[in-house]
Amino acid sequence: MLEIKNLHAKAGENDILRGLDLAVRAGEVHAIMGPNGSGKSTLAHVLAGRPGYTVTDGEVTYKGRDLLALAPEERAREGVFLAFQYPVEIPGVSNVYFLKAATNAIRKHRGLPELDALEFLALVKEKAKVVDLDEDLVKRAVNEGFSGGEKKRNEIFQMAVLEPSLAILDETDSGLDIDALRIVAGGVNRLRGPERAMIVVTHYQRLLNYIVPDFVHVLVDGRIVRSGGKEMALELEEKGYSWLEKEPAAAGAAGR
Amino acid sequence: MAAVAEEKDAYRAGFERFAVAHAGSDPAWLRERRTAAIARFVEKGLPTARDEAWRHTPVAPLARGRFEPADPAARPAAGGLATLPHDGRGARLVFVNGRLSREHSALDPGEAGVVVASLRDLLQEAPGRLEPWLGRVADGRTGVFSDLNAAFAEDGAVVLVAPGTVVTEPILVAHVAAGDGAPAVSYVRTLVVAGRGSECRLVETFASPDGRASLSNAVTEVVVEDNARVDHYKLQEEGREALHVATLAARLSRDARFSDHSIALGAALSRSDIDVRFDAEGGDCVLNGLFVLDGRRVADTHSRIDHAKPHCSSRQLYKGIVDDQARGVFNGLVVVRPGAQKTDAVQTNRNLLLSREALVHSTPQLEILADDVKCKHGSTTGQLDPVALFYLRSRGIGEAAARSLLTWAFASDLVRRMEIAPLRRRVEQYLQVHLPGVADLAEAMP
């Protein structure tokens, strides 16, 4: 589904990604871990197409297409979804309206009929249950006045409604207490499926107790230095990252 | 300067002709007030770029152009009245080129305790009812265009609400410019007097066709007596070449409530001077404003809220959306006089620039001469939040629609505060046309 080869990227003026390789197949969940500043969030943003990040070398192929040539909205319509580390508050725009506009933009792109207000509300009702999101929040302005946990749940709720093929979760666990983490992780797990791939970017191993990955990759200085199975996360939790920072990059494409 | 002096002479000569023509019809007190007003104008002259109050606004088109009195017999273009924000209930006064058009108006408010009339009629029938107020609210302090209006205005809307009367339906006062040819000026004067404990709502609209250099000079005087309430709405949709100068002056008695919602969407140049004074304790004033400007339009609001007495509260929220090479000016002054303790004043100005060449001059000012008050002001001017824009796009919403949605969101709290549905819909329609890609904006509101 996704193949990243030798990806080099800058955030603003700074070189962050320095030759990253990763392959993700449908149905797989990949965890990306690494110390602060290693490039985890940059990877998530580059994949979603956030302005301000420049790819200087390498390529990203998604479903056989050059992902980097697509505008952010085109990526979303092709099934890429980014759950933001810091979801944005948009006063004056209701969550429901915003999500209906997004859903119909995606459906239109896929040649599906647009949903009317009633059909959409039925969908919202069903999906809000995935993360136990209060219907009152669904109707409010996007993320406005939401608690940290509510914002993250809203991200997963949006993901449930938009049904992406490739979901990228950028530190969705950061700042969550254990109850909120369980709800968010439970929502994510319900969305796992053979047609859907996920990249879970996290700073903490704790999340991986709840979202059990198929592969774990360690990102250091903009490259994947080590890849392994879910048990590697525990090793990282115990030993930290410093012992890896001296290792050379893992040979070959990771995650196979 | 020579040109300005010439203009002044032209106005003075015009007034001499006007005074002769009205010698028989105007009551003596009105002739005196007109003469005093033209004298104030002659003393001050037309503003120049060196006037502090006109520093950021190109005054030249107002001072330079020759404006003949607009033809009161001209007929509005077909369709020109079709978009009036009116649902058929309540009184409606339509002024074409500054003169009441009886065929388009419905003067009977259908409710007891309120007089809705044209100024011209009332001056003939009962001038004594106007004498205490006319030209006394918008007095010499409100600027030279208000003086010119006081000298030349012959018609306008008068609403007199008897004590204790609640007028349920909003009263619509629509000003329409019509005709073609030479640049023409219309003077209109509106007077609202809300008696003790009464309530009324007034909607004023201004429209003129594109392609014609008209000048509207409008003055609205509002008297809110003890414990009364007046809500004033204004929608300015003048044509692309039109000039619009307006003065709104309100005087609030004890426990009086006044609100103004002012929406400016049109005109080449519009200037709005707002002057609110609390004459007694317990008054409450809300000033909301939104301008949406494209092309090379200029919109300028100068407001002054005079907390002359203690225990009054004022809330001002003005927003500007400025695109292309348009320019907005906001100058808001809140004065708290000595002894006006427990004043509670908040003034906010927020501007959204949609292009690199768009510009807003924002000058909020507090002048506080009392020591036990709560006053706050703030001003921000910026572009659409790039992170919010990316957030919307990352969900599949196209860039143009995302920009429109955020622009709409910026304006929506002011639009929502307009409690008159036909007027709100009119503004929503305008925004829908001007913000591409957003199918149903009203639905977007939380």
Image (cartoon, rainbow, N blue to C red):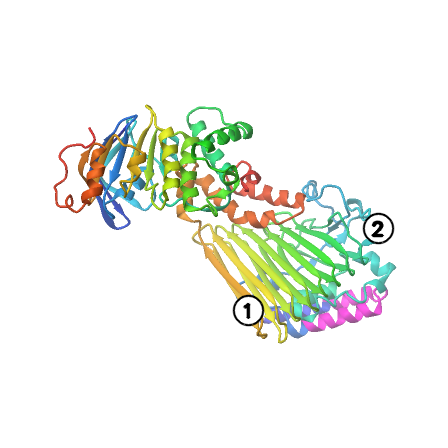
Give residue A153's quadrant in the image.
top left
Main SS of the magenta part reads helix
Task: Left or right? Give the position of B318 relative to B403.
Answer: right
**Residue that carries the numbered disc 2 in the rendered image:** B112
**Residue that carries the numbered disc 1 in the rendered image:** B366
In the rendered image, the quadrant that contains the C terminus of chain A is: top left
Task: Left or right? Give the position of A81 relative to B55.
Answer: left
Q: Residue at x 69, y 73 (%)?
A: B40
Q: Residue at x 14, y 39 (%)?
A: A249
Task: Left or right? Give the position of B145 relative to A117.
Answer: right
Give how far across and how far down residue B12 sits, in percent: 71, 69
| B129 over B437 or under it: above or below | below
Q: Tell me which amino acid carries mark 1.
A: Leu
Task: Left or right? Give the position of A35 relative to B182.
Answer: left
In the rendered image, the quadrant that contains the N terminus of chain A is: top left
Q: Tell me which amino acid carries mark 2.
A: Ala
Q: Nearer the viewer, residue B121 or B25?
A: B121
* Cα–Cα span, label 2 and label 1: 42 Å
Start-end of magenta stretch:
B14-41
Q: Could you tell me if residue A6 is visible in this image?
A: no
Give how far across and how far down residue B245 sits, in percent: 64, 59
Q: Residue at x 43, y 37 (%)?
A: B398
Q: Earlier in the sequence, mark 2 or mark 1?
A: 2
Q: Secondary structure at mark 2?
A: loop
Q: Nearer the viewer, residue B32 or B250?
A: B250
Is disc 2 surrounded by few (<14), some (14 to 19) or many (20+) residues within 10 Å?
few
Q: Would residue B20 be counted in the magenta stretch?
A: yes
Q: Would residue B290 be counted in the magenta stretch?
A: no
Give residue B431's quadrant in the image.
top right
